Image: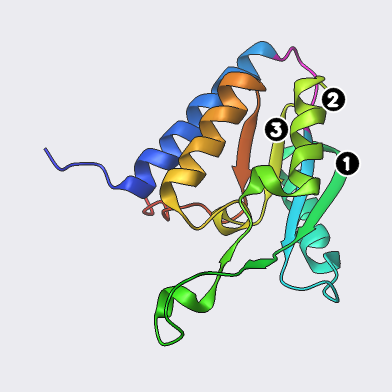
Amino acid sequence: MKRQSRAGQLRGLRQHFYRQAVGAQADQPLRVLAYSLVPSPRARPDEDWETLQAEADQLGYAITARLHDVAVPVTTTYLPASSASQGVYTPPWDRPGWREAERQLREGLAHGVLVLDRHSISSDEDEYHAVIKHLGEHCRAFLHLVISEEPVAPT
């Protein structure tokens, strides 16, 4: 049997917490927070909001709040010629918008977070996995991506 890819495992974990949220929710629309990570302080999340709103409308989600953060490069101590020295972005739990999202989820103001893709959360697989688990286990919430980690093959 073929081993499931890491991206498939991450998608499966997200779907597990989504099913839990749907199962706990009566016949009400799921409430979600729209979250965007913009590349610079001058960038506006307006395009992201349009895409996230369209996805929410298509799925019948109700967006309760729009939150965003600016991707701030962290200074590294690697050699200047190293590709790793180009910087990494602040982990989600150190971003004010993401912390606010978690607060609202813990307080039951929403059932999940809607984002464009996993890189809005983290490009690091372990960190991204930890965020999915934290949302599901501690906030009883799910993460929905407009662009999945791994494309689903057509049937």
Side of 45 where 146 appears, left or right: left
Say which residue appears at 80% left-offset and 20% top-offset: 108
| Alpha carbon separation for disc pair 1 and 3 | 11 Å
Say which residue appears at 59% left-offset and 56% top-offset: 117
Q: Which residues are magenta?
A: 25-31
Side of 10 where 102 appears, left or right: right
Q: Residues within 10 Å of mark 1 (few under 14, many from 20)?
A: some
Residue 61 is drawn in which quadrant? Answer: top right
| Alpha carbon separation for disc pair 1 and 2 | 9 Å
- Residue placed farthest to the left in the image? 1
User: Which numbered circle lies on residue 109?
Assistant: 2
* Mark 3 secondary-structure assignment: strand
Are the residues at dot 1 and dot 2 in contact (C-beta closer than 8 Å)?
yes
**Amino acid on which the number 1 mark rests in the picture:** Ala
Residue beneath label 3, please? 112
Q: Does the magenta portion include 7?
A: no
Whether residue 128 appears in this view of the structure is yes
Q: In the rendered structure, which disc, 1 or 2, sits on the residue that comes first in sequence?
A: 1
* Mark 2 secondary-structure assignment: loop
Could you say where residue 132 lies in the image, as x and y percent from the top left? 54, 35
Q: In the displayed structure, would residue 92 be above or below residue 134?
A: below
Residue beneath label 1, please? 65
Q: In the displayed structure, would residue 73 be above or below residue 142?
A: below
Q: Does the magenta portion include 27?
A: yes
Residue 71 is drawn in which quadrant? Answer: bottom right
| Alpha carbon separation for disc pair 3 and 2 | 9 Å
Say which residue appears at 86% left-offset and 76% top-offset: 42
Name the foreground residue: 109 vs 88: 88
Q: Quadrant of the N terminus?
A: top left
Q: Does the magenta stretch mainly form a helix, a strand or a loop?
A: loop
Could you say where residue 148 lies in the image, as x and y percent from the top left? 51, 52
Could you say where residue 25 lies in the image, as x and y percent from the top left? 71, 15
